Image (tube, grey):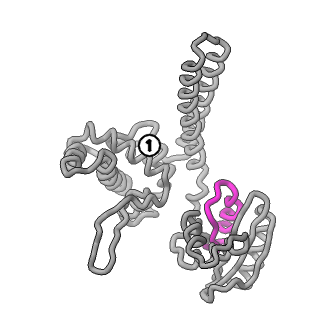
Amino acid sequence: MVSYGFDVSKDWVDVVHSDYSRQPKQHWRLDNDQVHLTTFLQEQKIRYPKLRCSVESTGPYHAALLRVCLSLDIPCYLLNPITTKRQTKASVRGTKTDTLDALRIALIGLEADRPINAHTLDPAKSLQRAATKLEQLATVLIGSQAHYELLQPYDSEPLQVAFNECRQQLRSSAKLLRSEALARCDPRVEKLVMSLPGVGQKLAPVLMTEIGDITRFPHAKQLIAYAGLDPIIRQSGTSVHGAGRLTKRGSPHLRRALFIAASIARRYDPDLQAVYERKRTQGKSYRQAVVHVARLLTIRLYAVWQRGTPYVSE
């Protein structure tokens, strides 16, 4: 198997391919656009039909490569930058160049086991994330306005109007983006998701767009892992140090939405409230107890989505 590592930037891409010999075979520098990437990968696929590609998650800069790999049916693995950073620190030489970064990405890609799919570039997910970001900016603006008024007690009507208009525009734009995202989702799934306690009109689109196709997850545990709500197990020899911190892999947007839903649901759902109280009695912190509730809520979400029937409390 041949692995191609892509170290992407705004304007160009450094590419190195390697195999299990762990030695760089060749290095290229390409323009970071779909035309050049398509031509390059078409040529490489003829040479190595079973090639695979790996790239760090770099905001918008890796999008062109993902689109090309999906169109050419080439397995592509989107890596967490933390993983490659650890590899660099673990290196004896500690040298960091674009070529070496691409080689490390290629080597990590040899062990990767979850390639991207069409959901990775789902427009509904992008719209929903943009809406969330605008709402966060509106919240930041409220804090900035309060800070200004604290420092400047004198009334300034033009500034007050500017703050209010900007905040309203951000929220209006967020509402529009959320509506567009929701229009791309299945209304039947929306009804199922909103039947769960703690899930309303704002959280439902986040859950639907972040999860996408529920059949991607054969079991609820895999959905929990995708949300990064599964604990890290530390074991050495015969010593097991129990469940530690959360892995926080997968989608942070999904994890945040499930946490918010759980923090609401535990106040209104008797079963979830009992779980929360039991964990608190055991000495768990508020956050740890809510995470336990979030896992149970994720299992319920998975069940109603798979069955196609709304949740009904017993």
State yes or no: residue 180 in magenta: no
**Residue at the bottom extreme of this rendering:** 21
Image check: 45 left or right of 300? right
Which image quarter: residue 18?
A: bottom right
The location of residue 250, given as percent across then percent down, is 48, 59
Residue 185 showing in the rendered view = yes
Residue 297 showing in the rendered view = no
The location of residue 251, given as percent across then percent down, is 49, 55
State yes or no: residue 70 in magenta: yes
Image check: 293 left or right of 190? left
Q: Residue at x 37, y 59 (%)?
A: 245
Q: Residue at x 44, y 62 (%)?
A: 215
Magenta region, residue range: 52-75
Image check: 258 left or right of 173? left
Where is 199 relative to 159, above or below? below
The location of residue 60, given as percent across then percent down, is 67, 54
Where is 141 relative to 7, above or below? above
Which one is in front, 293 or 162? 162
Classify mark 1: helix, strand or loop: helix
Residue with the mark numbered 1: 204
Where is 21 relative to 111, above or below? below
Q: Quadrant of the C terminus?
A: top left
Q: Residue at x 67, y 14 (%)?
A: 158
Q: Residue at x 77, y 62 (%)?
A: 32
